[in-house]
Amino acid sequence: MKHGIYTLDDIPIEGKTVLCRVDINSPIDRERGVLKDTTRIRFCVPTIEELAARGAKVVLMAHQGGDLEYQNFTSTEPHAKVLSELMGRPVEFIDDVCGPAARERITNLKCGEVLLLDNVRFMSEEMTLFETKLKLSPEQQAKTLVVRKLAPLADFYICDAFAAVHRSQPTLVGFQEVLPSAMGRLFERELSALTQVRETPERPCIYVLGGAKIQDAFLMMGAVLADGAADKVLTGGLVSNIMLVARGSDIGSTSQDFLYANNLGEYIKVAGEILDKFANRVLLPVDLAYVDETGRHEVRVDELPAPGLLVDIGHRTVEQYRKEIAQAKTI
């Protein structure tokens, strides 16, 4: 046991059926059905290989595609092919999640075999709207369809989807309520590293928060600033756009409309509260990049609004952040 959670060393999986939730969500060429980056898949291979080598009957559950836009969802079949190549052993795929075909195949698995189920987000229970609107407790998650159908077929549940474990969705929090559970090797490694960063980071400790998936960033930012885990936070992407709006900057109608069209306006208030408390520890861009029909352009923050959609930090900000990062001991 590490950090109060069981590991693979604590459970007898030989000959047992194991449900293993992994995070192999990857950039994909939708037209060709080919993964453009297999980094996440490589990271989860050690856990899957260990489970199979120890004689478990391995059932993999995974998602593919951001769950705010249904058209992003695709099958996990390409992931099974990549896993097979990386592991040098067959990883079977079935285009079912918890229906009769999937359950029959799970029942007939032999020791050491690996089966990847289809995209769990094809189930409405795994979508963000289900999560945010119903706000089910773990006990209630255990009563969802996917848990009720798959849990009776398994002996153990393993979570190795560290990058997704903050989500309150059935395949991430429901099975622990009804099955003996443990974390996989990737989860164990990441949790150990994160625990060190949160509890005993080398100083200065810098957090870099940006990109498009800002919900996680705002959940994290207030916490790490309040408890002192972060000495400074460097912002970019939609995170910095929202922080600038909260500070009173006019980022332009195109970027402003984008925020509200994607239901991100609620984070402006959150950003304002963070700035009120920690303005001296949150670094905002001094210049930004926007795109229009002629390409990419940069504009200083004091020259806003921008005539196009703000998509990046500018070169002046890059240089400023580079100096901060170069002085940091933990990033």
Image (spheres, helix red, strand yellow):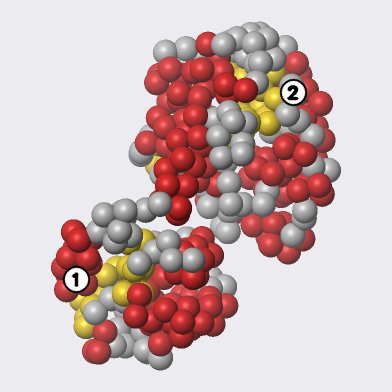
* Nearer the camera: disc 1 or disc 2: 1
Between 97 and 143, the one lying in front of the other is 143
Residue 109 is situated, as x and y percent measured from the top left of the image, at: 68, 12
Disc sitting over residue 154 in the figure? 2
Q: Residue at x 68, y 10 (%)?
A: 15
Residue 152 is situated, as x and y percent measured from the top left of the image, at: 81, 26
For numbered disc 1, what is the local secondary structure? helix
Instruction: Please state, as top left, top right, bottom left or bottom right, where the C terminus lies in the image.
Output: bottom left
The reply to whether residue 93 is visible in this rendering is no
Q: Which of the 4 quarters of the picture holds residue 280?
A: bottom left
Q: Which of the 4 quarters of the picture holds residue 235?
A: bottom left
Residue 24 is situated, as x and y percent measured from the top left of the image, at: 49, 37
Q: Amino acid at mark 1?
A: Gln
Please rate how many residues cluster around mark 1, counting C-alpha atoms within 10 Å: few if below 14, some from 14 to 19, many from 20.
some
In primary-sequence order, the first of circles 1 and 2 is 2
Tell me: 19 left or right of 74.
right
In the displayed structure, 177 sits above or below 241; it is above
In the displayed structure, 301 sits above or below 320; it is below
In the displayed structure, 118 sits above or below 85; it is below
Q: Amino acid at mark 2?
A: Ala
Q: Residue at x 67, y 52 (%)?
A: 168
Tell me: 92 left or right of 317.
right
Q: Residue at x 26, y 84 (%)?
A: 301
Residue furthest to the front: 200
Between 192 and 256, the one lying in front of the other is 192
Disc sitting over residue 320 in the figure? 1
For numbered disc 2, what is the local secondary structure? loop
Q: Residue at x 55, y 47 (%)?
A: 164
